[in-house]
Image (cartoon, rainbow, N blue to C red):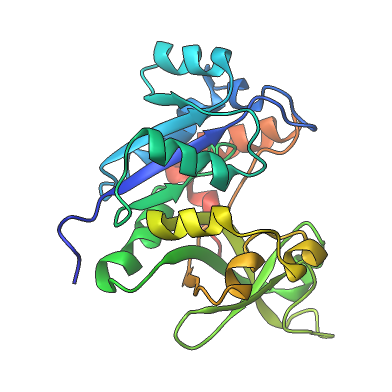
Amino acid sequence: MENKKTVFTGIIPARFDSSRFPGKPLATILGKPMFWHVYNRAVQCKALSAVYLATDHEEIFDCARKFGVPAVMTSKDHKSGSDRVLEAARILKLPDSSVAINIQGDEPALNPEMLDQLVLPFISDPEVKICTLARATTADKVRSKNTVKVVFSKSNKALYFSRNIIPYASDDNYPCHVHVGLYAFRIKYLKIFSNLGQSRLEKIEQLEQLRILESDIPIHVVETRYVSHGVDIPEDINNVTKIMQEKNNESNISP
């Protein structure tokens, strides 16, 4: 059962410099900066004790204060969002037994139930160390190398992540799972992850979660029906805005 001392904290990494979309967290959507929408959806997850923005830029930090979003300043030198989340966790003095949720800062259409799904395994099983999400789909929809795939065991432990189709399928209608890049870490294992050097498979696939598997640390996978709608380039703003305007975000649910 749940350890009563376990604290679940959401942290939204928001760096200013993006090669494809500089200043992305400040992009205006429906009259508010993008990070505000992510925060506003994340706080709807009742399991989270608090949600913070972790940024590396004064303009984002000041804008967060203006809109009432709790924020912490972090280094500009981090190579990944996970490293930024860890620094924020240290600033906030989160205990090793607590759980940090790495909430993508470019997901303004985030469905809060996805965060509930991430938290649930930690409540039901104190041995869970890291958790992420996956959504069922078919091979024809995920052949792009930019869409990460995952396979997992009967006990929902990740076996492998890849940019290629896994398992291999010549049939376009063959079922597979796309990885949804939300993560929940016990702080102890977030520290371990940050201290690990790049692994062999990570370098080949360019997927940092593979260093965890190569270090024999299990990643629990939860199946979700919700679709992720990230903002990668300015042209994505219009599409995400339409999705957010639809009643109850119904288009954010996979059929």
Number of residue marks: 0
Residue 22, by quadrant, is top right
Q: Residue at x 51, y 64 (%)?
A: 133
- Residue 131: x and y, percent? 45, 64
Q: Answer yes or no: is residue 127 visible.
A: yes
- Residue 161: x and y, percent? 67, 71
Q: Is residue 124 left or right of residue 253?
A: left
Q: Residue at x 55, y 50 (%)?
A: 251
Question: Residue furthest toward the right?
Answer: 170
Residue 1, by quadrant, is bottom left
Q: Is residue 156 left or right of residue 139?
A: left
- Nearer the observer, 40 or 254: 40
- Residue 40: x and y, percent? 39, 32
- Residue 204: x and y, percent? 82, 66
Q: Residue at x 73, y 60 (%)?
A: 147
Question: Residue furthest toward the left?
Answer: 4
Q: Is residue 178 above or below residue 193?
A: below
Q: Residue at x 79, y 84 (%)?
A: 169
Q: Is residue 218 above or below residue 231?
A: below
Q: Is residue 100 left or right of residue 227?
A: left
Quadrant placement of the C terminus: bottom right
- Nearer the observer, 50 or 140: 50
Q: Answer yes or no: is residue 246 visible.
A: no
Q: Is residue 14 above or below residue 3?
A: above
- Nearer the observer, 164 or 229: 164
Question: Residue furthest toward the bottom?
Answer: 154
